[in-house]
Image: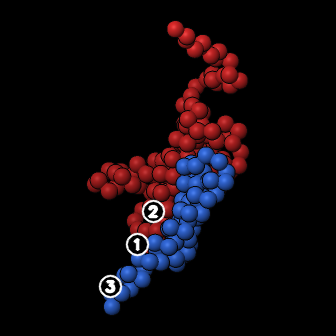
Chain colours: A red, B blue
Amino acid sequence: MATTPIKSTATGKEPEQGFVYLPLIVGWLVPGAGHFLLRKWIRGALLFAAIVCMFALGMAMGGKLYHGADNILDMLGFVGDLGNGLMFFVSKFFSLGAEHVRITTADYGTKFIVVSGLLNVIAAVDAHNIRTGRKP
Amino acid sequence: MLQLSHFTSVLLFALFASTVFGITLRDTPRRMFRYGTYCFSLFIGSVIVFSWVMYFIKK
């Protein structure tokens, strides 16, 4: 019975060594940095611009940064905000962001901040997928 | 404090979200651009449609 020979592992692309979760963590801390680490410069720059602009607009509109878990909606908002990585921690450190939402624009701003965090998580996971070879 | 209109906010939101969706959910630059444009038009289109729906509900 003929058996197909096992192909050599030297197919031209060796699996990269190192910590596979580094692009995920770096990408979470700084938007687009996970892609920069993988030399995807244009993708990284676009992600950085989109996420940072969204966060900055949210802050400029008087958006609120969630800081606790008083109720389930606050908890979900806090999780979304955490997705912003360093931007969230720096803003918290300097006490940026409104305490209370009083006008409609500030409510839009709050949503901008939460969504920028969620988009940053998607971008960081994408960097991880590129690193593991799941995505070209 | 920056005060944008609702529609301007929607335009910016759609632009940023579509950019990230396009880059992360497709493989090649051409497909990324097409998917980003598709998402952007869906965001804006649905906003316009639902705005008119709410207008007629109010009437």
B20 sits left or right of A46 in the view: left
Q: Which mark is residue B57?
A: 3
Distance Cα–Cα, label 2 vs label 1: 14 Å
Residue type pointed to by label 2? Lys
Q: Quadrant for residue A49, please give it.
A: bottom right
Nearest the eye: A129 or A3: A3
Tell me if I can see residue A48 in this picture: no
Asked whether the beta carbons under mark 3 and mark 2 sit within 8 Å of each other, the answer is no
Say if labels 2 and 1 share a chain: yes
Q: Residues within 10 Å of mark 2 (few under 14, many from 20)?
A: many
Q: Say whether disc 2 or disc 1 marks the residue closer to the N-terminus.
A: 1
Q: Secondary structure at mark 3?
A: helix
Q: Which mark is residue A87?
A: none
In the rendering, at what x and y percent does residue B50 appear? 41, 76
Q: Along the horizontal axis of the image, is A70 left or right of B26? A: left
Mark 3, Cα crowd under 10 Å, few <14 / some 14-19 / many 20+, is few
The residue depicted at 67 percent of the width and 54 percent of the height is: B30
Q: Is residue A36 visible?
A: yes
Instruction: Identify the residue under disc 1.
Output: A102
Amino acid type at mark 1: Arg
Chain at tag 3: B
Is B23 placed left or right of B57 in the picture?
right
State the mark number for residue A111: 2
Labels 1 and 3 share a subunit: no
